[in-house]
Amino acid sequence: MHILITNDDGVMAPGLLALAQAMRDLGKVSILAPDRNWSASGHVKTLDRPLRVKEVVLNDGTPALTSDGAPSDCVSLALLGLLPDKVDLVVSGINPNANVGHDVTYSGTVTAAMEAVIGGIPGVAISLDSPENHLGLIDYAPAAALSRQIVQALLNNEELPPDVLLNVNIPYLPQEQIKGIRVTRQGTRVYRSRLDSREDPRHRAY
């Protein structure tokens, strides 16, 4: 089993490292993720410029690849042959915030998994429902352990139906307090966006 790990927070994000470490017992792990944060980037397909890829080393010494493209670009590059071995599964995350309802159309985490499904590969997006305005470091360990459990169950059973991805949201709780896993329908999301109009102090026009 060859698992591709990616995300939308950038290759050095702690959630990606926790996810990659959790997947190692399940098969060969390759990492190809953006070189910067692409949160709320949506489903991007870069066509107007070359995509560049370079090697990096994660904080635990793990080698990885990073690209100046979007999360979906990273998945596309891997599936089109950038990696020498065929990819069997794409797992994207761990995003530090939940992706529910309309979020899935904006989320680079989810659309990376969507790109995998478009390419005929099962895709799983993992997000952590950390508290709003959380201060300090985020503990990804419980979410990583549950991610491993979910992917293991996926591998032990029948494959996902064609054109179906798993969008997993994990509560920010100790592992022993998580009661179980439930498959549910996708709901909606209420945004309270506003236009904040300001005048450029240098009176520049764009």
Image: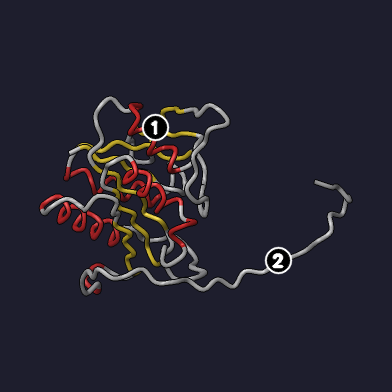
Which badge, 2 or 1, comes first in the chain's sequence? Answer: 1
Relative image position of residue 187 (x, y in whole percent): 39, 72
Q: Is residue 141 left or right of residue 199?
A: left
Relative image position of residue 6 (x, y in whole percent): 37, 43
Relative image position of residue 36 (x, y in whole percent): 52, 42
Q: Residue at x 57, y 31 (%)?
A: 48
Q: Nearer the viewer, residue 36 or 156?
A: 156
Q: Is residue 99 above or below residue 54?
A: below
Q: Residue at x 52, y 36 (%)?
A: 46
Quarter of the picture holding the N terminus: top left
Query: Furthest-right residue in view?
Result: 203
Q: Is residue 51 above or below residue 75?
A: above
Residue 193 is tagged as none
Q: Residue at x 36, y 54 (%)?
A: 94
Q: How much space separates mark 2 and mark 1, taking CA atoms?
A: 36 Å
Residue 77 is tagged as 1
Name which residue type carries label 1: Leu
Name which residue type carries label 2: Leu
Confirm or deny contact between disc 2 and disc 1 (CB under 8 A): no
Q: What crowding class fits label 2: few (fewer than 14 Cα within 10 Å), some (14-19), or many (20 or more)?
A: few
Q: Is residue 144 above or below residue 76?
A: below
Q: What crowding class fits label 1: few (fewer than 14 Cα within 10 Å), some (14-19), or many (20 or more)?
A: some
Q: Is residue 196 above or below residue 201?
A: below
Q: Is residue 144 left or right of residue 48?
A: left
Circle 2 is placed at which residue position?
A: 195
Which quadrant of the structure image shows residue 180? bottom left
Under tag 1, what secondary structure? Answer: helix
